[in-house]
Structures are given as C-alpha cells and as structure tokens.
C-alpha cells in the first residue's frame, strides 16, 4: 500500500515538474527583452535532435548508395555512414559545448562586474590626468 502511494506521489511530482518546465519554456519564449536565457536549458533537447538528424542523414546516405549499386551501398552502410555519424555528432557536441561555455563566461563576467563595483566603491577616485601638471603653467 505504501509503495503505491509513493509511486503516485512521485508521478504527481514528475507531472508537476513537467508542467512547470513547460510554463518556464513558454515564459522564456515570450520574453522579448531576453532577460531569461533559454539556450542553456535547451542544450539536451538540441543535442538529442542533432543525434536523430545525424542518424537520419547517414541512413539516407547509405540507402541512396544501394540505389547506385550493392557494393556502393555496402561501402556506405558499413564504412562511411558509421564514421560520418560519429563525426557529425562530435561536431554538434563541440559546437553546443562552445555555446554553453560562452553563456557561462557571460554569467561569470556579470558576477565579476558586480564584485568590482563593490570593491571600487570603497576606494577614492584617482584622476591621473590632473596629477601631472606642467611646470611652466
């Protein structure tokens, strides 16, 4: 009996989490001032979509090889398609990681800018261009 309650509770929490995520997703799409960054949240879905698209592309390439000849199809299906799939997925992964790194750098720069304002607020302002006056003036 308690296992059933735990399972039902977990299912409710899971469906609530999905609804919350969907609400955040649509709220982010409606954010015209780009205050909410959606791209980092979409990375897993984009990566999965790229894997599916890569698989579809190499399968289509192999099938097209069989329309030319049986040998061409076998070469494409057994040699070129698997290597092509690995290369495509690797390139997409690298591109997505670079994109994610740029977002993380932006977040850290914003944090650093806030810290430097706090630190600089306690120091007197030094104007170097006024401290070096000519002797003949």
Image: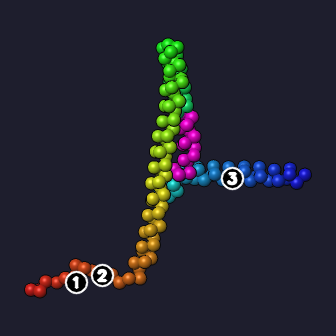
Q: Is residue 136 left or right of residue 97?
A: left
Classify mark 2: helix, strand or loop.
loop
Q: Are the residues at dot 2 and dot 1 in contact (C-beta closer than 8 Å)?
A: yes
Task: Name the image quarter holding the C terminus.
Answer: bottom left
Q: Which mark is residue 126?
A: 2
Residue drawn at 57 percent across, 46 percent down: 44
Residue beneath disc 3: 17
In depth, the one of 82 and 111 nearer the eye is 82
Discs 3, 2 touching: Cβ within 8 Å? no
Secondary structure under tag 3 reads: helix
| Label 2 neighbour load within 10 Å: few <14, some 14-19, many 20+ | few
Corner quadrant of residue 52: top right
Residue range highlighted in magenta: 39-53
Mark seen at residue 131 = 1
In 3D space, how far apart are the residues under numbered discs 3 and 2 (Cα atoms)?
Answer: 53 Å
Residue 118 percent across, percent down from the top left: 44, 76
Give the tally of numbered discs: 3
Between residue 104 and residue 68, name the one nearer to us. Answer: 68
Residue 129 found in image quarter? bottom left
135 or 18: which is nearer to us? Answer: 135
Residue at image position (68%, 49%) is: 18
């Amino acid at each position: 009996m308690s296992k059933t309650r735990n399972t039902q509770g977990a299912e409710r929490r899971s469906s609530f989490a999905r609804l919350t995520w969907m609400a955040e997703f649509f709220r982010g799409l409606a954010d015209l001032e780009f205050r909410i960054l959606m791209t980092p949240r979409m990375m897993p879905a984009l990566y999965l979509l790229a894997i599916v698209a890569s698989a579809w592309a190499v399968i289509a390439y192999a099938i097209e090889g069989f329309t030319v000849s049986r040998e061409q199809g076998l070469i494409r299906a057994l040699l070129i398609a698997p290597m092509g799939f690995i290369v495509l997925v690797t390139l997409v992964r690298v591109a997505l990681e670079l994109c994610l790194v740029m977002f993380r750098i932006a977040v850290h720069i914003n944090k650093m800018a806030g810290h430097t304002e706090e630190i600089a607020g306690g120091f007197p302002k030094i104007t170097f261009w006024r401290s070096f006056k000519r002797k003949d003036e």
